[in-house]
Image (cartoon, coloured by chain):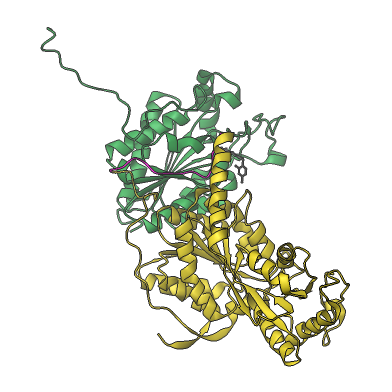
Chain colours: A green, B yellow
Amino acid sequence: MTIESYSEAIVADRPKALSKTQSHYCPGCLHGLAHRLIAEVLDELAIRGTTLMVAPVGCAVFASNYFECDSVVAPHGRAPAVATGLKRVSPDKIVFAYQGDGDLASIGTAEIIHAAARGESITVIFINNAVYGMTGGQMAPTSLVGMKTTSSPFGRDVKTMGSPLKMSELIAGIDGATFVSRRSMHNPAEIRKAKKAIRRAFEVQINHQGFSLVELLSNCPTNWQMTPLESLRWIETRMVPVFPLGDLKNAAANNGLKGV
Amino acid sequence: MAIELLKGNEAIAEAAVRAGVDAYFGYPITPQTELLEYMAKRMPELGRVFLQAESELGAINMVYGAACAGKRAMTSSSSPGVSLMQEGLSYIAAAEVPVVLVDVMRGGPGLGNIAPSQSDYFQMVKSAGHGDFKPIVLAPASVQEAVDIMDLAFDLADKYRTIVTVLLDGTIGQMMEPAELPPMKPRRTAAPGWALTGAADRSKNMILPFRLQVDDLEAYNLQLQQKLALIAHSEVRYHEQMVDDAELIVVGFGTAGRIAQTAVRLARRQGIKAGLFRPITLWPFPERRLSQLADDARGFLVVEMNAGQMVEDVRLAVGGQAPVKFLGRMGGSLPMPDDILAAIVKLDQASTRAQPDAPCTIEGPSMPLKHFVSVN
Ligand SMILES: Cc1ncc(C[n+]2csc(CCOP(=O)(O)OP(=O)(O)O)c2C)c(N)n1
């Protein structure tokens, strides 16, 4: 092959929806990957310019710096309510909320449940890393039984601290929820499935089919006190058995008229 | 427009509609519920947004979201509900988006009761949420004034990108009075440049209620304080009656101010030179005008439906130039004109400019002393 006949094809590039900046996330943290997957979907669906993001309080509080779309930061747990306000007055926009598990599964349970119950036309990306990352690794409602965290130093004891809260199952049981999926980011195959679910969730919103949520099993190497690779293995061997992967609800596929 | 017999809460709702509110989010609580119910019917009629939230936490954050989109958004509640909204209010203040809140106060603390009260003056004027911020607080004393204030509330919120609270008690919310509604204003169509409308052909807009670096947050706070100083300088509003030759000034806001007006007239009939001063903006507080009045007045009587809250601001404004006495009722009771009159008579006898600190005990003729809060 001569130089002249060589043609280049870009096979991987930074998504347009992802800002050109360094992130503050810890080495090995999957928040960055989740951002990238969302950004790729915004590009592919050509909705970056009409998308409004609601960022949470949690490690992703700086998400506004990383997405090339308009955004606001909600109080801890209230992102679904803020997203509801945005969407109700801007029905022509795509609104998504990005939430951690402390945010969505603890302090913000009322807001997420009722946004789903109303069939709010928003998309929620739910990062489940089984701890409160930003405040230093305290126990979350999603922490596994026996899991040692800074606020459960002897391990999560079911008798006094309850069992992991499975929010996606709970939300899938709500009539107003159209698409609910739990995916993981611990290996390339799962990452591809995660992206597909994110894409599906945004399509549900674009098609005015109601509420969509994708839970992504994620890691926190810093607070789990593991190397990034160990943390991926931990997701696979410890989290996945407790939080099974798959589409928990796909009403749009079953019934194209849902949530008109 | 014609004068009609209107219920306070409903008149406020319709006035908000005519001022161009795009979205209402709320949660039921007495004595404000008629406002929510009116909006439930009226907003969809006009193709605007009404949503009953899952809680006041939900409501205030929905308002936050809608305001971020550059729309005129409001909520309404009463004391316990407003307590729940305070985190959201602080975020809204930090984000500097315009929001209107109608707070129809009821008796507290705790669940208290559903009777009219003014016991949340401190909550709204002094501490509407964590951090250094102040909403503009407007206190109407009649249904008509409440109607007129709604348009002003939305304009001020937009002008300063701030929270404007309309603070009233259950009396005005529940009472029917003749009032005239303004004509329907056209709704704003263009969104302000800072609003979240999609970054299709401009750089992204970010509404951030935080500044993590110490220097940034201090600079931001300084800028916020400058805005508040401008509001304090430009937006003071009050109502006064017969103060020109007054020796005694009776001060009250909202319903208490209105009852005090009757007492001042009764005092005048007895030859006592009393005047009425009724702040309409509780923040910014009309401290300069009160301080001017203190140059000549022999004494002040503050009447409130609480244990003595605004009286602290009156004392600060008067600055020890004359005695400031207090008459208050709590738990949903109203101070009666005769009781206020008796307090004015007492003050008239006791206060001289020469003895600003002369003791003065206040008793009501028709009510045993224990019913009154008397701060001396
Ligand atoms: C009302 C309120 N309570 C507590 C906090 C402190 N806080 C900040 S982030 C956080 C937990 C975040 O954890 P999670 O939602 O799981 O997100 P992560 O940081 O793990 O991504 C807490 C408790 C707060 N900011 N506001």
Taking depth in this image into account, of A117 and B103 the one nearest to the observer is B103
| Above or below, B92 relative to B258 | above
Quadrant of the image containing the C terminus of chain A: bottom left
Foreground of the two, A34 or B88: B88
Residue B210: in magenta span = yes
Residue A187: percent from the left, percent from the top?
A: 42, 24
Q: Position of residue B329 (x, y in %)?
A: 76, 76
Tell me, yes or no, if residue A171 can be seen here.
Answer: yes
State the predominant SS element of the stretch in magenta.
loop
Name the side, left or right, on which A99 lies relative to A87. Answer: right
**Part of the protein shown in magenta:** B201-213
Taking the spot 55% from the left edge, 48% from the top edge, the residue there is B224
Classify residue A212 as left or right of residue B225. left
Q: Position of residue B161 (x, y in %)?
A: 47, 55
Magenta highlight on residue B350 = no
Q: Residue B341: horizontal and vertical position, in percent? A: 77, 85
Residue shown at the point (53%, 19%) measured from the top left: A230
